[in-house]
Amino acid sequence: MSVRAGDILIDVSPLRTSVDFRWLYAARLVSILSIGLIGVAVSMQVFELTRSSLHVGLVNLCLAVPMTIGLLWGGVLADRLDRQQLMVSTRGAYVAVVLTFLLNSIAPHPQLGVIYAAALVAGAINGLSGPPLLASLPSLVERPQIAAAGALITVANQVGAVLGPSLGGVVVARWGFVACYTVVAVGAVLTPIVLSRIKPLPPVPGRPSLPVLHSLAEGWRFVRGNRLIRALVSIEIAAALFASPTALFPQLGLERYLGGPEAVGFLYAAPGVGALIGALTSGWTGRATTGRALVIAILVWGAATAAVGPMPALAGALFLLAVAGVGRATSEILRRAMLQHNTPPELQGRIGSVWLIQATVLPSLGNVLLGGATKVMAPTTAILAGGIVCLVVTVWLAVANRELWTGSESIPEAIPIE
């Protein structure tokens, strides 16, 4: 039986059929490219000021804690306000944060405290803006295109993850932090302008507005009561926590591989290269209805990350990080599609916030753990140990959650409001 290219290559039909999805896609591409640039700039600036991977991890934690709160609140707002207006307003507020990083870098003596403070605010804003974007996808494309739309968003994410860090390393090396933050500021200004072209996305009519805590509880009751959703939420925890060692990249690039800022940028970009390959060959994911492929993808992610630890050559580490990126992107596409297929429209924002917490906040917490581990062991040992923990815990969770092997494509009835 022959395999057609369309069975493997990414499905771009959402871009052809939906003008609003094209605007959303363009905004996401600009935004994620800017985030890739600023991520490298902030990490390198913090390491330059402190010479500590732990501080790099702690800055990520400053993003993670308020981001968690922002994601929870953003999930509630995305289910009760116009999602397009919420995206425009939050990305507009992010411009002020980028200007803070820029002004601090212009100062004769950049302050570490300012970076920490700006990271706190950036985390909260990014948390608020994430759920409405994710919850908007089912409203902008046809139901059979949900997986394809998610894969295209992953491509945008990984194009930014590849080009952003690579360009960030080059720009910082040649022109300094001020130039890098200036480029980021331009992208931050463009993003809300592009998002303003999307049609209004009001909440589902006829749903009463619950108090915030009750609204959050409604979402968590759905997660707890749906065995498949609960399995999808739990299966990627270990990988997100222990197989995302980006806080160690400045130390690896500068000290283990004896490279400059460009080497650090390549380390940050390598997972994105693999993830981009995984997304571009994701045409088959729209037909996946069970979690078998999801579990395999997470195991590939963890195994490749573990192998980075003992790898002595930069080229080998970049290859392994790219393989890990393939696994991560594939798991992201599959898990997001399965969650959205099995979540009712009025809960998309809140369930999306749970997914985003795992995708963004847990890696930040994991970076703090791995950064702290470098105080008692070599960074290579910390990476190896993290990958092994990921493998062991993922296998255990897969065995314990048999619902992943059957899956479901039916959207359940809305849970009653209490």
Image (tube, rainbow, N blue to C red):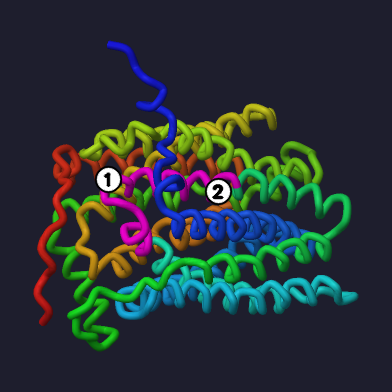
Q: Nearer the viewer, residue 198 or 208?
A: 198
Left or right for 171, reference 398: right
Please name the residue shown 54% across and 43% down the image. 383
Q: Where does the image place residue 245, in percent across and percent down from the top left? A: 55, 48
Q: Nearer the viewer, residue 305 or 189?
A: 189
Q: Where does the image place residue 340, in percent across and percent down from the top left? A: 27, 55
The disc at residue 370 is none
Left or right for 167, reference 384: right
Amino acid tagged 2: Pro
Residue of label 2? 245
Q: Where does the image place residue 202, in percent across and percent down from the top left? A: 33, 75
As for residue 25 lying within the magenta part, the answer is no
Q: Quadrant of residue 349?
A: bottom left
Given the current orientation, which residue lies at the most extreme right position? Answer: 108
- Mark closer to the chain start, 1 or 2: 1
- Residues in magenta? 135-159
Q: Main secondary structure of the magenta part?
A: helix
Amino acid tagged 1: Pro
Given the current orientation, which residue lies at the most extreme bottom position? Answer: 211
| Residue 378 visible from this viewpoint | no
Residue of label 1? 144
Residue 317, compared with residue 25, is above or below; it is: above
